[in-house]
Amino acid sequence: MSSQIIPVEPFDYVVFGGTGDLAERKLLPALYHRQMAGQFSEPTRIIGASRTEMTHDEYRKFATDALKEHLKPSELDKEGLEKFCARLFYVAVDAKADKGWDKLKALLDEAKERVRAFYLAVGPALFGDFSEKIRDHKLITKQTRIVVEKPIGRDLESALQLNDTIGKVFKEEQIFRIDHYLGKETVQNLMALRFANALYEPLWNAEHIDHVQLTVAESVGLESRAGYYDKAGALRDMVQNHMLQLLCLVAMEPPSSMDPEAVRDEKLKVLRSLKPITAANVEKTTVRGQYKAGASANGPVKGYLEELEGGVSDTETFVALKAEIGNWRWAGVPFYLRTGKRLVTRMSEIVITFKPVPHSIFDEAAGRISANQLVIRLQPDEGVKQWLMIKDPGPGGMRLRHVPLDMTFAQAFEVRNPDAYERLLLDVIRNNQTLFMRRDEVEAAWRWVDPILKAWDETGQKCQSYTAGTWGPSQAIALIERDGRTWHEGE
């Protein structure tokens, strides 16, 4: 089975921070793959921009080296690489000075009618400066969009300021706030499973679902992000954006259509329905953790404070929390969220656990009846498993087994599984905002997260230590087991 490739109209993609880590690891490889899939129409250009002085040819060399480093040799095609490099250009610009902007304008003005996308692959502190330079140098057309990466602020106040700054230059419909988790194939399949099948949606409520788990586990430590991460922590870095967006897709009401505004309206309702976590209940509903020295698959690893070079920090590298949604569909259904660094493995998944059968007709010899589960794996090995009870084959009487109906996408479809950025980058060109965050979504998420941060300060809730290479602090296990439930640890 093959997927249908629909080309997009010609465009100019300007990547500010075009020589940075994100461009090197994700953006350039994603755009190369989309070209190779036949999704570009001609003439299409990709324009790198940063403070570094560089010629067009030097930038093409930079891009070639990046693709050779981050793609498999089998993914590189000599003719395709030459074609990709031919559409690459470079302009040296500075967010705080006028140098180079006239050159960028001259390059873009060669095709004023073309779709024009600006990707801010830079720190949030520069979002306003770049937006104003784009405006001041008259680079905005009717076909212009701007893409901004997280973090959108570090609290509600700074998010409001950041949104105001960008909003003074661009209309809301021109702003694409990217969360790469929403571009993952499995995330979109969640909507297909719910809304394109008669099987699940009638059961998708408190009457039939016992609880929901969302896990985003990382096996790595700080890597090169120490400066940012120690000021952010796991709650700001993962929960406020990625995990709350996943929760919204699980919990939202069926939208009237797949129109971007209809989908985002329903997500917003979920965020506004989250029951507050405050100083009164924060210690019962949240766990903070920080990893200490331990082991990974590659051998011994340092603890968080050692990676900070002997620093002192109470920043959480792990957080688990119990969230509840105050509406009719989800009344009484807990949503357990956990995320952390230096855990057992790299894994992201959503687990929907259904309520047990009301009465068993089988005797004890048949074995225990386990609850049905729908496991949606985002990474690695994207796919869906529906866990069911069946009879163990053979003539030895009735023996029950808990087994999965497995649909691993790489096996089920004879197509390459695209990286999330590939879809999102071209959704910007299509002007499709469905998988991007609207301003009120970002602010509603912060309105729920801010009181948790405040409650941690008010109660003095400290980070619990956990050994690198484990599933986090024991208190996180107690958080869910107090309710008679257990974390799903991947199968």
Image (cartoon, helix red, strand yellow):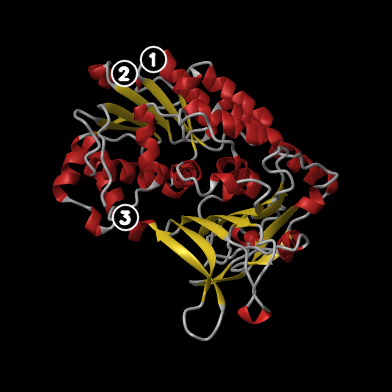
Q: Which residue is mark 3?
A: 413
Residue that appears at 67% across and 56% down: 311
Between the residue at mark 1 and the residue at mark 3, the CA separation in whole angstroms equals 47 Å
For label 2, the SS is helix
Task: Residue 115: give x, y in percent of width and height.
Answer: 31, 23
Q: Mark 2 touching mark 3, by CB under 8 A?
A: no
For label 3, the SS is loop
For label 1, the SS is loop
Q: Which residue is mark 1?
A: 137
Q: Nearer the viewer, residue 310 or 452?
A: 452
Decide if residue 461 is in sight here.
no
Between the residue at mark 1 and the residue at mark 2, the CA separation in whole angstroms equals 7 Å
- Type of amino acid under label 3: Phe
Q: Nearer the viewer, residue 122 or 184?
A: 184
Q: Mark 1 touching mark 3, by CB under 8 A?
A: no
- Type of amino acid under label 1: His
78 shown above or below 87: below
- Type of amino acid under label 2: Lys
Task: Residue 78: give x, y in percent of width and height.
Answer: 15, 50
Which corner quadrant of the image does residue 453 belong to?
A: top right
Q: Classify mark 1: residues with Cα within 10 Å, few (<14), some (14-19) or many (20+).
A: few
Q: Mark 1 touching mark 2, by CB under 8 A?
A: yes
The numbered mark, 1 or 2, whose residue comes first in the sequence reads: 2
